[in-house]
Amino acid sequence: MASNTTGVVLDKTLKDLYNLDEKKDSDITLVYALPTAETQTTKTIPVSRKFAYQSPSVITSSGDELARLYLQVVPQLFGFIAGNMPLILMDLDEPDEPDYGDRTSPLRAHQADAFRVYAQLAVHQRPQLRFAATPSSIILHPETKIAVANPMDCFEHLPHTVDPTVHYDLLSKRALVFSGLPTPPSEVIDTALQVNGIYSLEDLEAEVNRMIEPIQKRSCPFVVKMPQSLSGEGVFLIRTESDRHHAIDVLQQELLRTLSSNDGSGSNKLSPITSMIIQDMIPGEAVALAFFVTRSGRAIFTSCCPQIVDSHGHWEGGFISYKQQDQLKAQYTTIVELLARFMHEKGFHGPIGADVITDQQGAQLVIDLNVRVIGSHPLGLLRTYLSVDRGLHEAVLFFPLFLKCRREVFEAKFEREMREGRLIETGWCHDKKGKTSFASIILAAEDKVRLQQLIDRVYVYRVSDSS
């Protein structure tokens, strides 16, 4: 087996893909950060209001933990495939206690974590990483545009590769229903209240009850989605009466929140994002298709991966079988090319993920569009490095992975696996005190049995739900 002496090498990078169909190198800077629905992650990044999001089942309410996940680990994961192009990540707030990092280093601890992730890559494919203390401190070269994961208010002043309003609409689950793309049978429940209206709390509660009523009456199973939910945190799989009761409890609070925003005058003004989608639950398992849409509208397929989704519908990662990728590419070519044409017509070019399920009649249906880098992109772009060069034909990416140890402890336990390319860190940030870790990793093995054995060994260090 080849050892990892020269670094991880990707089949293609975002730099390569952005430069396809171009007469010259694209002048693009990646600015990766994930928004939150309610919790402000740092002092300089306010919660987006124009580009508003929904996460009623968010994994943590801690602003500091969300900052480490959404401003560090996820952006590092997305930036892992950047290649040699500019990548900007947002700094965390200054620590309230002495930094646990190397006191002799000019880097802060979270910055050192990120640079160590990219140090695994071959030198020619490492991103040009820098950090910004505030969105307003981001300075671009003339004619440079930024590519983002999700539109956010704080970056709107910067020129974008894709109009942020268009991008935001493409991310909308409500817009997907009306897009003309093949989707499961769906019912959209919009608020009957006026966007600019002023309503009493009683009015809003009555409207919530009206919107919830179809969920109370519909027969199981079915799916309920919020229009701008993140990572499955606003998606509810209703299989049982217990699922229904849980969803209603959460949605009553979330709908009331999105229906109203306190403007300080004592009045409640309607938010423009309030709607729900009720969708048929299609039997079977969805796959995540990862591809890239070039400026001319061509689709560059990178992977097709079964997803890891918890019982509540939250995304936790994905598997890939490299020997099956050619057959899967052929199987999903038609839907991928259809989506690429749709995105091109809307003015989008860049990385994209689509969750697709096949119904009992054989129709391929789009159940979600993630118009950005997705976790499956790195898996697909590691095919030569893992499968061809090392015979590691099965791989998995985990996110979020909460580990009850420091990075040095984890790496010491898996030094051989990292040297052999069986374990790749795609995102890492220690907790505030430097005792535990937030991570994203890729594991690879020759077959599914040995992959599961490696997973079991890693899970020894995972923070359990009961911890």
Image (cartoon, rainbow, N blue to C red):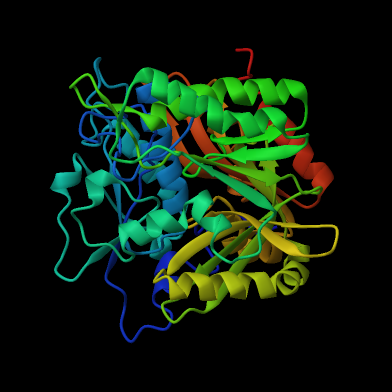
Q: Tell me, yes or no, if residue 252 can be seen here.
A: yes
The correct choice, above or below, for 271 with respect to 182 in the image is above
Q: How many marks?
A: 0
Front residue of this view, candidates 32 and 251:
251
Residue at 52% over, 50% down: 174
Q: Is residue 317 left or right of residue 426?
A: right
Q: Residue placed farthest to the bottom in the image?
A: 23
On screen, 201 above or below 137?
A: above
| In the depicted structure, whether residue 106 falls above or below residue 161 | above
Where residue 94 appears, as percent x and y from the top left, is 22, 25
Q: Quadrant of residue 278?
A: top right
Residue sitting nearer the eye, 69 or 323: 69
Q: Nearer the viewer, residue 339 or 86?
A: 339
* Whether residue 230 is visible: no
* Residue 59 drawn above or below residue 422: above
Point 64% across, 13% down: residue: 466
Residue drawn 34% across the image and 65% down it: 162
| Residue 222 pos. (x, y %) | 72, 39
Question: Which image quarter is the N terminus in?
Answer: bottom right
Q: The C terminus is located in which quarter?
A: top right
| Quarter of the view holding residue 336 | bottom right
> For this view, does 296 lie left or right of residue 25?
right
Residue at (33, 45) in percent of width and height = 51
Q: Nearer the viewer, residue 273 or 336?
A: 273
Residue 430 locus on image (x, y percent): 42, 27
Q: Position of residue 429 (x, y in %)?
A: 42, 32
